[in-house]
Image (spheres, rainbow, N blue to C red):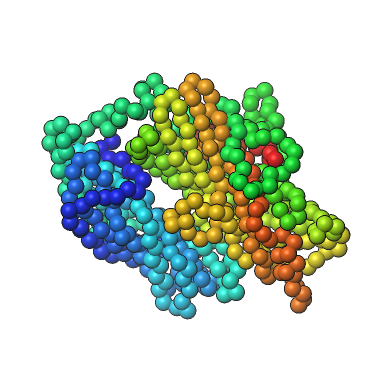
Amino acid sequence: MALAPLLPAAAVAVETLKVDTALPYVCALPSGPQPATVRIRAAFPDRAAVGEEIRPTDVTTTVELPAAAVADLTALKAAEVRAETALGVAAGQNGQETQAVWRGTAQPTGVPADGPLTLTTTGDVPVVTASAAGDLSFTAGNLDVGLALGTADGTPADPASLSVACAPDEDAEEDGQLATVPIAPGPSTGEPGGSPSPSDSVPPSSPPASGPDPSESQDGAAPTHGLPRNEETGAGAEKPAGAEKPAGGKSAGAPEAADTPSGTPAGRGSAPTCRNEQATPTTLTAYITGYSNVRKLNGANAIPVSCVFIEQGEPGIEFRPDGMHVVQTSDASLFHEGRKQTPPFQATFLTFGFAPTTATLVLEQVGPMSVESDMLANYPVYTSDAYVRAPLVLRVLDARVNGTRLDVGPSCRTEKPLTSLEPDPVKYPGDHLVLHGTGRQVIPDPATGYQLTSGGALTGEVTIPAFKGCGAGGENLDRLFTASISGPGNYIKQIQGQTCSAGLEDPPADQCTEDRQPAVIPKPER
């Protein structure tokens, strides 16, 4: 490849080329396809040399949705939206092209009574490095807009989120080109203007041809970041300092399932349906489960077997002082009967130390969820870190104290998403859960730990916010739930099973069932 998308780094430019362009798009809204205007502002260097990193700065993406979008949101009783955007940008040179994703987030915006809805997001974007001379062009492509919806009283709407897919208007004259940066020959390019072969950009520290290629998929799956396929998943990350790990049980290990002689699970038990009807070649599906502490109640509750859809992002390569890193950010979403949530599950505790309380709960996804992976490839040792970020609200559907039913009403939930300490708050603002997993492989030994494709253990610590909307018939139960459940220091251990490459024509039998559901159903581990 002549180009490689890298992680953000400082771009050096003699002069700045400022871009401000408005492009016609068509967005798929609940009411149907609607015209929209997407305005992109950015600053590029006006020229660069081969091998020099180019990073657009001051990037904003403004989406103006028509009045029909406002009507759709009003019908969903949404009074406030929080937007996240993912804009595909093609970087092309000398007939070759690579894709990058410009991601942005916005502060909450009120839904107007009528007229258009304007959403402006900002964020860092990937670096692009040209390894040949010639004009380097940047062209805007498809745009995905994720909307977290809130009602007038501050609670999540129903549904709590809306995904809007936008594409450039095919009938428009504009081609989406944002900027062209001339690339001058550098000292190590050989012939001026020459286009290097793939090996020209591989440093001596990269693994030899006999080692695994981190940019290639395993078992014919779509490209994905991760170590070579896990044959025997080992221990996951250690629990965070101060977290109270549930007593008893074994250490993190491979997701387990009762196997038939063919190697597929013998029975699906209570596992919910996990089939993506709109799978693409890069779509993965998987089951997750685990345990979560409720520190105030001095106990741990099982997280039910739940379905998650993962849409893999484009892997990128970055050369750092410690070696070559393969990085990837993938989008994910929970799925249960058409909603972004877990199946309902029961939790039983001794409230205040003496009152047996049973509650029926749901974890509801209220915004975009991501899986960020970073693998250091120093042959023969491969190590990886993965972070899962998910905005999840805890809903209470039913509660009984000492056998007597409490009427919690239809809107009992945490007033905001569960929150974790975020290691990169500038890049990932807002309230969300953070889970972390590590992986390692020393060739030729099997890989251990967590990988996106083969799963493993992810751990984290979460604060449960105060509750809101609990009670019916004039009885306010908010303070009761807040006093008995809410608070910091709740340790979580989640186990992800082997993924199913649901978009492949012939996925491996040990990964997928005949109807393209994940074959492996993991067991929770304490």
Residue 413 seen by the camera: yes
The answer to whether 78 appears left or right of 273 in the picture is left
Q: Quadrant of residue 117?
A: bottom left
Q: Position of residue 338 (x, y in %)?
A: 60, 54
Residue at point 64% right, 29% down?
264
Q: Nearer the viewer, residue 71 or 413?
A: 413
The answer to whether 288 appears left or right of 146 in the picture is right
Q: Position of residue 93 (x, y in %)?
A: 22, 43
The answer to whether 258 appears left or right of 35 in the picture is right
Location of the C terminus by quadrant is: top right
Q: Nearer the viewer, residue 229 or 222?
A: 229
Residue 23 seen by the camera: no
Residue at point 40% right, 37% down?
326
Residue at point 60% right, 68% down?
155
Judge whether 16 appears above or below 194 on screen.
Answer: below
Location of the N terminus by quadrant is: top left
Q: Position of residue 313 (x, y in %)?
A: 43, 44
Residue at point 57% right, 63% down?
160
Q: What is the tally of numbered marks visible in this picture?
A: 0
The answer to whether 480 appears left or right of 226 in the picture is right
Which residue ends up furthest to the left in the rendered image?
A: 192
Judge whether 209 appears above or below 408 on screen.
Answer: above
Q: Quadrant of residue 458?
A: top right
Judge whether 218 appears above or below 271 on screen.
Answer: above
Q: Position of residue 308 (x, y in %)?
A: 57, 46
